[in-house]
Image: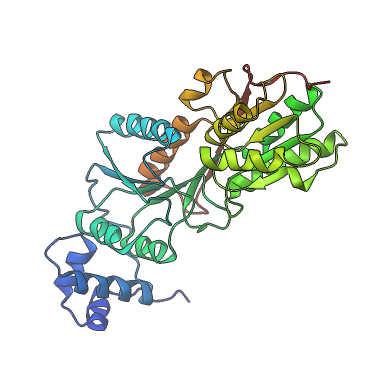
């Protein structure tokens, strides 16, 4: 026998407020005290309240995007793709930077509940647990862009073929004669970080080359961490002749460390990045990298978000877009 639907009247009674007040919270009205709104939203979470599917709210023309920071070049590509897709339907993108913290602090959630949104694209690695519950209570459609493994399965996701990208990068280096190849990547909690390194391991395994764990380094997808990681792997007794960086920003850090040591690229050290941000082909030499279709990924995330109200029952979709290797001047034959 199906469970009985929790009513607005029951939510109101449990929260100690009137039915009109609950209705105002559900519709994102601003004329509700902050403490009252939080109490009502928490009761909705606790009681498992579900808004009726019929009579869906009219779109307001605003799509929220939470990005890890505003100082990363790849975020520009993401925003460009999202804005172009939103523009097709007359919507606007509202951008929030999480400053690399889990998305969904209380103030941001309260603002989202107050002004309403047609949905949220989380261009971050993870959402705070309370944010997942809060968004569910507000019935705000959510799409995760390249999330960590184990993210809430109720959300649609858009990612890239990270494993295949790592594999192609290392197969390229092996074909050039490299056998001592290092891998730098982001935080190990990120699915994309692990998948890129797993592709690295798979390529070495296929070629019969053992993995030297001293040449595998996890940190963060930043230039400074790329330089720190390069310093670690280049200091081993038998240093690598090639480095696969899990992001182009990390690869630029490897460039810096190579220059500091007087290493020529690619004569002494070959470097492969990941993302293919705009600066990659302007590096000296231009960076060989795995192209991740960031703008297309963002556009697909917006499309999934706008289609959320018309989706058929079943698990939320998981979309993976293909990566491919772009060979430029930073890779060459292994030094003899």
Mark count: 0
Question: Which quadrant does the C terminus fall into?
Answer: top right
Indicate left or right for 149 with 312 as reference. right
Left of 59 or right of it: where is 237? Answer: right
In this orientation, which residue lies closer to the viewer: 43 or 173?
A: 173
The colour scheme used here is rainbow
Residue 35 position (above or below residue 274):
below
Q: Where in the figure is residue 142, as x and y percent of width and height?
A: 40, 51
Which residue sits furthest left?
31
Q: Position of residue 265 (x, y in %)?
A: 66, 21
Judge by depth and name the residue closer to the eye, 255 or 156. Answer: 255
Residue 270 image point, x, y percent? 69, 25
Residue at image coords 14%, 68%: 32
Residue occupying image coordinates x 29% and y 70%: 41
Q: Is residue 322 visible?
A: no
Q: Residue at x 73, y 25 (%)?
A: 172
Q: Is residue 6 visible?
A: yes
Looking at the image, residue 248 sits to the left or right of residue 196; the answer is left
The percent coordinates of residue 273 (x first, y second) are: 60, 30
Residue 255: quarter of image: top right
Where on the picture, by quarter, is residue 85? top left
283 vs 93: above or below: above
What residue is drawn where x is 62% and y is 17%?
328
Q: In terms of image quadrants, where is residue 320? A: top right
């Amino acid at each position: 026998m199906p469970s009985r639907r929790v009513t607005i009247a029951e939510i109101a009674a449990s929260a100690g407020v009137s039915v009109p007040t609950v209705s105002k919270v559900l519709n994102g009205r601003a004329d509700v005290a902050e403490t009252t709104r939080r109490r009502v939203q928490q009761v909705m979470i606790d009681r498992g309240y579900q808004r009726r599917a019929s009579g869906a709210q009219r779109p307001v023309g605003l799509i929220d995007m939470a990005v890890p920071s505003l100082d990363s070049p790849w975020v520009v590509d993401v925003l460009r793709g999202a804005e172009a897709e939103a523009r097709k339907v007359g919507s606007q993108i509202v951008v929030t930077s999480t400053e690399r913290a889990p998305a969904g602090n209380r103030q941001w959630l309260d603002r989202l509940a107050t002004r309403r949104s047609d949905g949220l694209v989380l261009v971050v690695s993870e959402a705070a647990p309370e944010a997942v519950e809060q968004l569910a209570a507000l019935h705000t459609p959510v799409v995760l862009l390249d999330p960590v493994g184990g993210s809430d399965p109720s959300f649609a996701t858009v990612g890239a073929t990270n494993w295949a990208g790592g594999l192609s990068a290392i197969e390229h280096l092996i074909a050039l004669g490299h056998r001592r190849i290092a891998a730098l990547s982001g935080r190990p909690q990120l699915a994309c970080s692990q998948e890129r390194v797993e592709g690295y391991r798979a390529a070495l395994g296929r070629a019969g080359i053992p993995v030297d764990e001293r040449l595998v380094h996890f940190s963060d997808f930043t230039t400074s961490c790329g330089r720190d990681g390069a310093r670690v792997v280049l200091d081993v007794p038998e240093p690598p002749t090639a480095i696969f960086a899990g992001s182009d920003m990390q690869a630029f850090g490897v460039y810096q460390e190579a220059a500091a040591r007087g290493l020529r690229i690619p004569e002494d050290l070959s470097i492969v990045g990941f993302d293919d941000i705009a600066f990659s082909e302007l590096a000296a030499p231009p960076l060989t990298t795995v192209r991740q279709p960031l703008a297309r990924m963002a556009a697909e995330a917006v499309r999934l978000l706008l289609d959320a109200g018309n989706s058929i029952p079943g698990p939320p979709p998981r979309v993976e877009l293909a990566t491919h290797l772009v060979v430029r001047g930073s890779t060459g034959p292994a030094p003899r």
